[in-house]
Image (cartoon, rainbow, N blue to C red):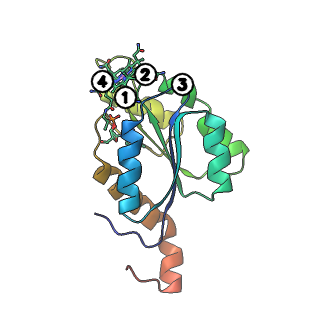
Amino acid sequence: MPRFLRTPRVVIGSIGDDIHVVGITILAHALRNAGAEVIQLGIQTPPEEFVATAIAEDADVVMVSSSNGHAAMWCSQLRADFDTAGAGSILLYIGGNLSVSAATPWESVEARFLSMGFTRVFAPRTQPEVALEALAADLAQLHAPDEQEQGVERV
Ligand code: B12
């Protein structure tokens, strides 16, 4: 399990009309166990609620889940919405079942969501540990200069 230099604040939810709840429940549980502060938005969360909550909660990362095949429709403007709200550089992760057809090559699905502005795109059935490792690495990279300056030690 990764160790965080400081408590990450994570906003998580299933976007748009998506009702699949098991993935976000497991992910939220794993994040809390790893020491993260999790703001769980639940299912059927409108894109604008991710933006408003992430800003209100001063989140480090937004984890979007989508399993019903509608992700591209609900996510196409999400990065732009964060830009408009003044939080353009927030970490934006997405996972679940992102394509309508399982036959779509993963590389093209990943490329599509990266081009929408997601920081990381996770393949179906990604285990929580993978997301935790990615988050620890991204946060360490983002905060590296601050931590060195302040002499913060890993606990
Ligand atoms: C259970 C289930 C349902 C239940 C949901 C119950 C509930 N309240 O959650 C019910 C029966 C209600 C349902 C409904 C529908 N479902 Co459904 N469902 C499933 C099923 C069988 C399992 C989903 C699940 O819980 N998996 C277990 C969890 C732990 O796995 P997970 O969600 O993948 O999440 C893991 C990872 O992916 C990852 N993860 C998930 N999100 C994120 C986000 C980030 C940022 C990260 C890092 C990781 C991450 O973390 C989790 C832990 O490992 C899947 C098939 C399957 N085997 O996956 C279909 C499936 C997801 N459903 C599907 C469909 C099509 C539907 C419906 C549209 C069907 C219909 N015609 O009505 C509706 C959706 C309606 C809607 N508005 O959303 C399709 C989606 C296909 C697609 N993407 O194109 C699937 C893949 C079935 C299939 N093979 O066709 N479903």
User: Which numbered dot is residue 105?
Assistant: 4
Q: Residues within 10 Å of mark 1 (few under 14, many from 20)?
A: many
The residue under label 2 is which amino acid type?
Answer: Gly
Mark with earlier residue (2, 3): 3
Discs 4/2, front: 2
Left or right of 45 in this view: 85 = right
Say which element carries label 4.
Answer: loop
Say which element carries label 3.
Answer: loop
Q: Is mark 3 within 8 Å of ligand 1?
A: yes
Mark with earlier residue (4, 2): 2
**Residue 121 in view:** no
How far apart are the alpha carbons under marks 3 and 1? 14 Å
Discs 4/3, front: 3
How far apart are the alpha carbons under marks 4 and 2? 14 Å
Q: Position of residue 43 (x, y in %)?
A: 51, 34
Residue at 72%, 46% (x, y): give it: 85
The residue under label 1 is which amino acid type?
Answer: Asn
Q: Where the N terminus falls, by quadrant?
A: bottom left
Q: Do the numbered discs 1 and 2 sit on residues whose CB atoms are within 8 Å?
A: yes
Q: Which residue is mark 1?
A: 97
Q: Which residue is mark 2?
A: 69
Q: Which residue is mark 3?
A: 17
Ligand 1 placement by image quarter: top left
Front residue of 47/140: it is 47
Mark with earlier residue (4, 3): 3
How far apart are the alpha carbons under marks 1 and 2? 6 Å
Mark with earlier residue (3, 1): 3
Q: Is mark 1 within 8 Å of ligand 1?
A: yes
User: Which numbered dot is residue 89?
Assistant: none
